[in-house]
Amino acid sequence: MTKGIKDKVAILGMGCSKFGERWDCDAEDLMVEAFSECIEDAGIDVSQIDAAWLATAKEELHSGKGGLPLSFALRLPNIAVTRVENFCASGSEALRGAAYAVASGACDIALACGVEKLKDTGYGGLPEASRGVLNSMWWANYSAPGAFAQLASAYRSKHGIDAHDLKRAMAHVSVKSHQNGSKNERAHLRNLITEETVLNAPMIAEPLGVFDCCGVSDGAACAIVTTPEIARSLGKTDLITIKALQISVSNGLESGFNTWDGSYFHTARIASKRAYEEAGVTRPREEISLAEVHDCFSVTELVTMEDLFLSEEGQAWRDYLDGFYDADGGLPCQIDGGLKCFGHPIGASGLRMVYELYLQFTGRAGPRQLSEPTLGLTHNLGGAPHQNVCSVAIIGRQ
Amino acid sequence: MTGIVTFGAYVPRLRLPLRMIVEGQPGAKQGRKTSGERSVGNWDEDVITMGVEAARDCLKGNTATIASVCLASTTAPFADRQNAGVIAGALNLGETLASQDLGGSQRAATTALLNALHSRSGAPSLVVASENRHTRAGSPHERRFGDGAAAFTIGDRNVIAELLGSAARSVDFVDHFRSSEERDDYFWEERWIRDEGVMKIVPQTIESALADAGVAASDITHAILPSPVPRLREKIAKAIGLGESAIAAALEGEVGDTGCAHPLLMLAATLEKASPGETILVTSFGQGCDALVLRTTDALRDFTPRNGVSGAIAIRREISDYAKYLSFAGLIDRELGMRAETDNKTALTQYFRRRDLLHGLVGGECTACGTRQLPRTRYCINPNCRALDAQEPFCFAETPARIVTWSADHLSFNPDPPSYYGLIEFEGGGRMFANFAEVTAGQIDVGSPMRMSFRIKDMDRKRNFRRYFWKAVPEITANRNGGADR
């Protein structure tokens, strides 16, 4: 194992726009909104940023290709801007670019920005993917909910769980996130829901109903990172540093080799092991104070808790029903509402997760502030269960 | 001796009860036939896909020796792109192959069969007859027609039925027609078709064929007779001195009249029940007449039974409602939603480059570790192998599979929602994230057995192109019902 970047990179400032149906905003407005908060928090001038990374997944819908959209929106001083795209994990990829640039010593201060403007497509859900050449000729025609719903069939079958019990546990995932999201003024969805509402909602992809699916939102989030030394020289104290930042990418094994049973994320198990090793975490269920995971669908969050070794295999559904991941439970998960309620502007989501940890560590989380969190985990997933990009990051006080 | 070596058939699982058609018409007339049903191609089936299924039933995996393939149809999807070539690709017949489409008449399939039987090359050939018939809503033909396909191999070894004689007549008698620009047939008066057409052309042609074969009408065990208008078979039989018991069942009320494919579908059904040494008369009517006299041989006794016509008829699902049929047949302008607007342009370069995968469902088998995989790639997928360029082609089309994961998706575009799909695992290794077809609610779960079926994958409505690929369908044996269509 390589040495990694534990404590080599500190967060200097962060910002996040309000997520939601931002009918009155362009992608430019969202980037400026997030960046304004971020640079003020960092306490630096734009001229001090050495390089920037822009994450956006559906650039054809809103911002355009390359690094130009960010450079134009912020009128950056002709610095390097690299656009990254790694499905829904793009935001984590941008942070990784900026963090690695700082850790390597190539940059003193780097910016990561993620943005997505999904509500200009006319669709209720995610827009249709553009048709590739070979893949669309032989891959099943599928949607995101249909792909993630596959987890439920395999998980239920593998562990012998009654379909209704699993559906109730999944419902609890969403009920909990709505409770948390209701306390977050930046969140897309702030209404409270009941288990009955979730269970009786119209079906999207069996067994996922409408309330098992996350919001499709507009939004942007930013992070400015530097070294702990520079952060202190700029007057920062109580530094928040990156403990681990890992990405694992499928190579086709899940959908092509007869070993994966479809009930878990092969990559998440690899990325989380690597992240715990990088951060020096040995007992994650006890050591992690809070988690922001990629709850694109209720069942995704549920099985992910096992892939992150926070729940025992086959037991996450019980942990949910027992309230272990509630705001007042053993390990609060999605304390900001998660993708489910804060929303899911694709390129911004990975950075939004880190933003919540940052607020919690700096005591700025308002009505949802947890008491004395020490170590937080983000899990940001792009793709589908059978082929995906998985990022796991661990953030904490230095 | 050249003759029929094997036969197979396919009838779409979907059936439209005639009652639904009658009840679906404004001012439904009393006394119309409401019992029975007809077959209906699903939204992702056409002449090519049904032809592939019939040929698979016929070939049972023995594709190596086929030297030529002929598709007979008047409703093939492509006017200028050989439809038989698509079928040959899906069957993995190789490319050292003669192929042709034959159409233009209700005699197309019998002519194709005759051509193959008259061929002196001796090399095995495949004749496929397939029709996906279009009618206007409420027309009498909507109740009479059906969709289906039959396939035969012709060769000179293990012949189960030999040709004793034949005859043909070419008469431009226009009982109905369909111009190249039209989807629907236009028919003239039935009494004229009967008296001046069928009864003056068919019996004479049959007599010539019997003379050519040296067989008397009374020697015929099974007579496959055309009936472009109702109740003509008995009249033809009487005219040639044939007992009514010899008239082969026309599959009315089960499949319907499958056009040019029908004589061959009836022949396949007849051969299923026939014994060695029986004489079979096959006729067709369409701007003239073809008549063939066949005799079954002792080899029929050892013939491995196929799913055949009776098996295909038994695997059935009733369509849920008339409106769904109208929508599949393109007879109502249905709202498909924004997700149907996606441009499905096909990169023909890519389609050609990977034609073994896309039409033949050919993946790879690693010569280093034995792992089967789909698609065939440069590096082996086995993480403990990763051999480069070590895979031999392996065809998954006939390999049974089971469901690993699945869902029913109500969001993505599908002409018949919900869209069923999931990960399937092939017996002996290899997997695929596949679209499913012919699934009914509650029918499948993790572990359910599936078989592969060649289907339309996407329609490019902008350019009127259709792209084919393989889907997984629930494996159903002939004596089980296909479940209700919901």
Image (tube, coloured by chain):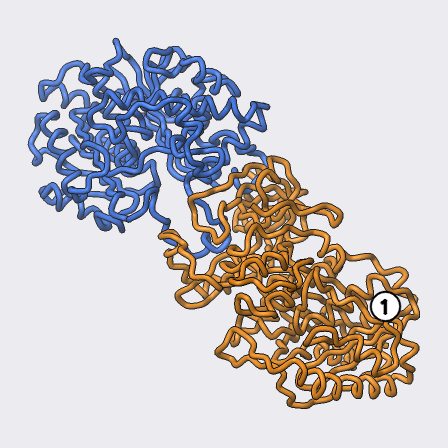
Of residues B364 and A208, the one nearer the viewer is: A208
Q: Is residue B123 left or right of residue B53?
A: right
Using the rendered image of the protein, determine whether residue A80 is visible from the camera's viewpoint.
no
Label 1 sits on what residue type? Ile
Quarter the C terminus of chain B occupies? top right
Q: Which chain is blue?
A: A
Q: Which residue is label 1 attached to?
A: B160
Of residues B129 and B184, the one nearer the viewer is: B184
Using the rendered image of the protein, determine whether residue B221 is visible from the camera's viewpoint.
yes
Quarter the N terminus of chain B occupies? bottom right
- Residue placed farthest to the front in the image? B30
Residue B451: percent from left, percent from top = 65, 48
Q: Residue shown at 64%/62% (left/top)? A: B52
**In terms of image quadrants, where is residue A170?**
top left
Q: Which chain is orange?
A: B
Graded by Cα atoms within 10 Å as few (under 14), some (14 to 19) or many (20 or more), the crowding at tag 1 reads many
Residue A94 against residue B102 in the figure, above or below: above
**In terms of image quadrants, where is residue A379?**
top left
